[in-house]
Image (tube, rainbow, N blue to C red):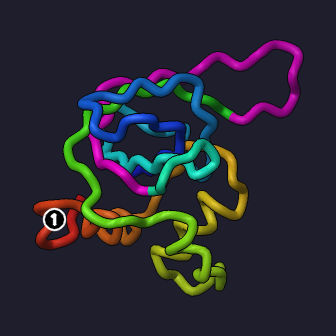
């Protein structure tokens, strides 16, 4: 399974990203070493959307806090960047994809990232991973 992360990313050209205690949704808590990740620089933090692709080099669940009944699972991850995005993809490009049942990868990404604008790690479908793979240099067949 591939994942996408929307987080504060100040320098997309870094070789590695260490993101601590990231909120998870839509299967994001299952992220593990070796998984492919697409990194989105959060527009909430001044970012531009999709900026990089990488591989998880470590993932560790964050312990839940005692005494809080409803808690969103959180994970700390370290990612090695493998490619930089060659064209933009963010809120502006995805906002028109709002028919939640149309099965398009653009709609899946809009729903998971922008319907609720918080930063998070999400699991994505194989179709969404192939779609995102086409945004990178050297991605001839769209594969992540």
Taking the image as shown, residue 48 lies to the left or right of residue 24, namely left
Decide whether residue 39 is among the magenta residues: no
- Quadrant for the C terminus in the image: bottom left
Q: Residue at x 28, y 57 (%)?
A: 85
- Camera-side residue: 89 or 21? 89
x, y (%) of residue 62?
59, 20
**With respect to residue 13, does 112 lie above or below?**
below
Q: How many marks?
A: 1
Q: Which residue is mark 1?
A: 139
Q: Which residues are magenta?
A: 50-72
Taking the image as shown, residue 117 lies to the left or right of residue 144, namely right
x, y (%) of residue 5?
48, 45
How packed mark 1 is, by other alpha carbons closer than 10 Å (few <14, some 14-19, many 20 or more), is some
**With respect to residue 48, does 46 lie above or below?**
above
**Is residue 131 visible in this depiction of the protein?**
yes
Q: Residue at x 29, y 48 (%)?
A: 53
**Is residue 34 visible in this depiction of the protein?**
no
Q: Residue at x 43, y 27 (%)?
A: 77
Most distant residue in the top direction: 66
Decide whether residue 71 is among the magenta residues: yes
Q: Residue at x 54, y 28 (%)?
A: 75
Which quadrant holds residue 137?
bottom left
x, y (%) of residue 37?
36, 46
Which quadrant holds residue 55?
top left
- Camera-side residue: 116 or 127? 116
x, y (%) of residue 26?
60, 52
- SS of the residue under disc 1: loop
**With respect to residue 88, does 85 lie above or below?**
above
Which quadrant holds residue 126?
bottom left
């Amino acid at each position: 399974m591939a994942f996408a992360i929307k987080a504060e990313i100040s320098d997309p050209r870094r070789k590695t990203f260490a993101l601590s205690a990231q909120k998870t949704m839509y299967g994001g808590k299952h992220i593990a070493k070796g998984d492919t990740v697409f990194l989105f620089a959060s527009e909430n933090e001044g970012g531009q959307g999709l900026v990089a692709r990488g591989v998880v080099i470590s993932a560790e669940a964050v312990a839940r806090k005692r005494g809080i009944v409803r808690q969103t699972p959180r994970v700390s991850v370290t990612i090695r960047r493998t490619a930089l995005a060659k064209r933009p993809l963010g809120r502006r490009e995805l906002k028109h994809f709002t028919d939640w049942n149309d099965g398009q990868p653009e709609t899946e990404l809009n729903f998971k990232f922008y319907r609720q604008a918080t930063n998070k790690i999400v699991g994505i479908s194989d179709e969404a991973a192939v779609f995102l793979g086409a945004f990178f240099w050297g991605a001839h067949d769209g594969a992540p």
